[in-house]
Image (tube, rainbow, N blue to C red):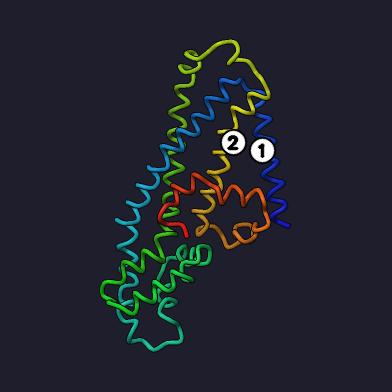
Amino acid sequence: MLGILLDAAIIAFFIFMFKKCAVKSQLKNAMESVSFIISSIIAVPVGVFLGDFCYANFFRPVIIGRIEKTVIDSGNVDTSLDTVDRIMTHMPTMVNNGARIYHTTTGDNLNELNKLLAGDLNSATGQIVDILARPVIDGVLRALFFAVAFAGCYRLLRAFYPTVEAYFYNPDRAAVSPTNGMVLGTGKIVVILLIVLSVIQLVGPVLPDFIFFRPETYSKSFIFKIFSENNLLMLFLGEGITV
């Protein structure tokens, strides 16, 4: 049911945005679409670089320190909890939430964790942290830095609107044509939707465990599934951390 409601909400979003584009000039719609696309292209590598840098230099060493003793002593502890569960008790809350959303403690990840725990424990801690914590923490950091970089780039590009408008101005481009305006504004509308989907996916672990924030809730959503599975923005923003 919620999937159907989400499809209806997305359709309503498209109708609302297209109606806004229909009352703007063709030139303004074109400039806004180009600005959104350029801002996304610039913000993705900035978000990825800064997210990776902060994770590797600030978060990773702290988490390694928190779980290192548990990992090294894992072979000598007799408990009802398995080693992975004991390690997760020392992880930040968002990492535990991320395990539920991104399945970082199941499937191939679990197999890789068991291999590491069966090998040299003195050198396994960093790799274990990368498997369990990186997809979650790095993802949130990338979303944060992407959002800041995107907003900054878009504001900067908007400052050039008068210059660009004066250079490309002619009566035809400045005219308000509902059909052409909607076509030229499509780039902006699609970018907005992809940004929202990407940010929600990346910041999922820090959101409350509520039914509306669970990906499986929208498994029946046809439109949502199309855009989430073919999200070009997420393809680059989530490279190396999404599962």
Please tell me which residue lies in front, 105 or 183. 183
Task: Give coordinates of residue 49: x percent, y percent.
Answer: 35, 47
Task: Give coordinates of residue 77: x percent, y percent.
Answer: 36, 86
Quadrant for the N terminus, please.
Answer: bottom right
Q: Residue at x 50, y 59 (%)?
A: 205
Specify the label residue 232 is tagged with.
none
Graded by Cα atoms within 10 Å as few (under 14), some (14 to 19) or many (20 or more), the crowding at tag 1 reads some
Task: Give coordinates of residue 114: x percent, y percent.
Answer: 39, 76
Q: Is residue 69 above or below residue 174?
A: below
Mark 1–mark 2 CB contact (< 8 Å) = yes
Task: Give coordinates of residue 52: x percent, y percent.
Answer: 35, 52
**Helix, strand or loop at mark 2:** helix
How many numbered circles does the render carry? 2
Q: Residue at x 35, y 56 (%)?
A: 55
Q: Is residue 132 above or below residue 176?
A: below
Q: CA distance from mark 1 to mark 2?
A: 7 Å
Q: Write down the quadrant of residue 112 in the picture.
A: bottom left
Amino acid identity at mark 1: Phe
Q: Residue at x 32, y 64 (%)?
A: 62
Please tell me which residue lies in front, 213 or 181. 181
**Helix, strand or loop at mark 1:** helix
Amino acid identity at mark 2: Ile
Q: Write down the quadrant of residue 76 in the picture.
A: bottom left
Specify the label residue 14 is tagged with.
1
Q: Residue furthest top?
A: 171
Q: Would you name the residue on which mark 2 appears? A: 189
Q: Residue at x 65, y 29 (%)?
A: 20
Left or right, 18 with respect to 82, comes to: right
